[in-house]
Image (cartoon, rainbow, N blue to C red):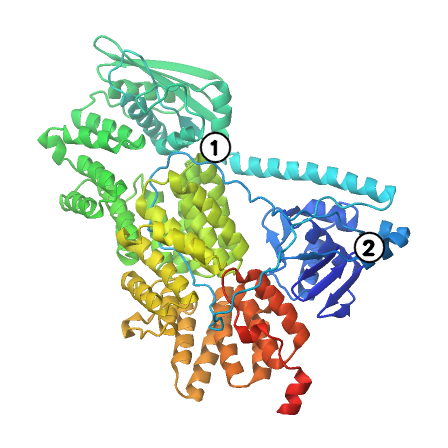
Amino acid sequence: MVYVFDTWRIDPALREARRDGEPVALPRRVFDLVIYLVEQRARAVGRDELVSAIWGRVDVADVQVSQLIARTRRLLGDDAQVQSTIRTVAGFGYRWVMPVQELDSSAAIARAMASRDAAVVAPAEASASTSAPAPAPAPAPAASAVPHPSEAPSSTLASGTAAISTADAPHRTRSIPPPGRRRRAALAGLLAALLLLAVAAALRVADRRVASRAAAEPTADVIAVLPMELDASADAGWVQIGVMDLVAGRLRAAGLAVPPSDSVLVALRALEPAPGATGVSEPRTLTRVDAQRLNPILGTRRLVRGSAQQLSDRWRVVLEAPDGQGRPHRVEAERADPIAAGSHAANLLLAALGHANAPEAESGAAPELVIQRSQAAILGGQFDTAQQILDSASPAEHAAGRVQLQLAQIDFYRGRLDAAAQRLDAVLSADPPAELRARALTSRGMLFLRRGDCSRAEQSFGAALTAPSAVDATALAGRGLARSCQFAHAKAVDDLGLARLRLEAAGDRLGVARVDNYLGIADANRNRLEPALARFESALAVYESFGIADAQRAALSGLLDVHVQLLRWPDAARDGERLAALRARIADEGQRQTLDSDRARVLVGQGRHREAAELLDASGIATADGAARRYLEAARAELAWRQGHNDIARTAAARALQDWPPRAADGRRAAIVLLLQRAGGVPDAASADTSDEPTNAGRALQRLAAAEAAVDPESAATNYRAALEQADALGVPAVVATVTQGYVLWLLRAGRLDEAAALSGRIAAWSAQDFDSALLRVALFHARGERDAWAVALAQARLLAGERPIAGALAQPPPLASVRNVMN
């Protein structure tokens, strides 16, 4: 087999490399590295496996590996920022990502078979490939979701666009999928290959085990409280979770690291349901096997099991837990109501575990009972039941601040944001105690984030932090996210880092994952795209272990967005497929529609127009509101413009802009303004992004729009140069590609071919995965009359075109450069 990618042709049998048809002498290890990664391109290759394959030993320093990777990328025209050929897989190894074609070179094979000695030293014939594509990895299963902010600001950028496509139908060629195991021509080579595969498999297993242990092992002695087992005679099902949450709170107040009750419940839902379990009123008994599965999810070392039994006139609560040395302890308490019994039992357990008792609450006052019952229902996701419990309270109880806060929480989870805001304002106007005030302010901050009002969200979270409270970490995380979307990056990272530290110390693994997700958004907002990918991946791994569909959607949307910014469309498509698998598990219609907009955006970016249109038609765009509507309209505008329906594109773009925050951190608003202008519309002056943030993509796209709208060449050139300078400073591939494409096309129309050629080098590395970048190379080589280079570029563009047409003139061979020069 001969491998062809970009402008390269690699012949393993002859150990020959050619670029643009000219032979290139690649160093031996560079050649071996390229061949190995290309042949294993269906998967990521671990660092140790790669060392064994290239060096033939394992005692190779990391710096040598890094130097070889850097040298190989440089020779291939790639670098560590773009990573268009060799992708770094954080904490594992490397993966080949550039599309590759395999050609059956009979002459090369014949020569290789005629020289068996050469076949032992150099790679020989690759095994035959099938024409069926490799299956995509199956998405991780998800279970019931816990509430998660769906309107948190995120960083998104429009894909690069170039106005050079007309009505010609594309001609597509087929890529052959990656080969299987390589054959060796000699027995020594075969034995070496088998040994290498065995070692690689063992290393992959070890890598997975190490990664699993790193994700699952707690950083502190974390102890989790399980739901109470309920006696069959009990007629108060809320006790199962209510007493659980009460005990967890008592242990936490005594200084123990205890995960929140909602995290425990979500983790339990990720496991197989107990036989006959239908809701929180059903008792659940965890076996020893269940505990072994639960601890890695929660990151805990110990579990507190308990039971509640209703006697004739009393309640009995029994708690069991091991101490730090693994010795089991059992306590029990009886009181007139379950709240008092659970509180006393928690104190007894603390004493048994060697901790000082917290003050005992014996009374079980009615307001406290109402709160515990409603909170138990909320934790179980039974919002109707929680509402009924609170509505049944006496007028005095109903007016209490904690009850109103609970009602506001229910309104928020149901999407009734105006009602939630009214209740929170009422609680705060009553001058509540410090703890209650902090909770209400934190809830109001989350509400402002949901609405996209980052400035007011920051103020609310900041007010919540003026007095120490149990919600410090949540308020810090929220304020960090609010600051990030206002470009206050240093302050945002400080808040998020401190919140993560506190949640980690508290044993809240799910809370840590949410902060990691917020840190991913913060990294993306300041254009640190590779670190953002690592953050989102880390959060997603925890979300998947808990089975939280809504949270997985948030992390996957972040991954998809960053992959689009990096012009890594195959990766973005995989993110879209995983999102599609989650859709049925998401209850919030707005989140489902936002998910649809993410998927449609990638489908349009890959030229899969029919699928994108069907998805948008089925998404319910007419009934969407808020962020979901603007994202759906943006995707519809891009699709219509790509299809040449400028009237539809103008209407959809105008609708998207109506709902878009004027100072959005992502620059996507400016991209929609640019699209509106390209579709023949006249953008409103209010659409301009007035941010002074130097890393805001909107500024570069605004200058590009000004250049394309300029009447005189001098003004156009000035704006093109300014847009390119800003795009280069930003360093985001999608923005650099969009600006470069517009500038190069303008230069080509002006006949300034050498300048166009010089600029086009900025995006050459992305032409292997991005259609617009590939099509620009077709236009450039066609204009310069470079037939061989034009033919290679045209083949690459057709591979990526999908349903996007290639202009008829560009699909016809250009006049030869020499003829063109004579004619000129």
Q: Residue 324 appears at what percent x and percent y?
A: 48, 24
When the figure is inspected, residue 405 is found, relative to residue 724, above or below; the finding is above
Looking at the rendered structure, the secondary structure element under dot 2 is helix
Outermost residue toward the left? Answer: 395
Quadrant of the frame with the N terminus? bottom right
Quadrant position of residue 789 = bottom right
Disc 2 packing (10 Å; few <14; some 14–19; many ≥20): many
Q: Can residue 696 be seen from the camera position used here?
A: no
In front here: 427 or 56?
A: 56
Mark 1 closeness class: few <14, some 14–19, many ≥20 residues within 10 Å: many
Is residue 308 left or right of 138 when viewed as pictured? left
* Residue at 9 percent of width and 31 percent of height: 395
Q: Which residue is mark 2?
A: 109
Amino acid at dot 1: Ile
Residue that numbered label 1 is attached to: 297
- The image quadrant that residue 718 belongs to is bottom left
Image spot of residue 505 (x, y percent):
43, 38
Q: Which structural element holds mark 1?
A: helix
Q: Nearer the viewer, residue 725 or 441?
A: 725
Residue at position x 84%, y 44% in the image: 189
Question: For this view, does 110 lie left or right of residue 385?
Answer: right
User: For this view, does 71 lie left or right of residue 732?
Assistant: right
* Earlier-in-chain disc, 1 versus 2: 2
Task: Indicate the amino acid at tag 2.
Answer: Ile
Q: How many marks?
A: 2
Residue 139 x/y as whole percent: 50, 40
* Residue 389 appears in the rendering: yes
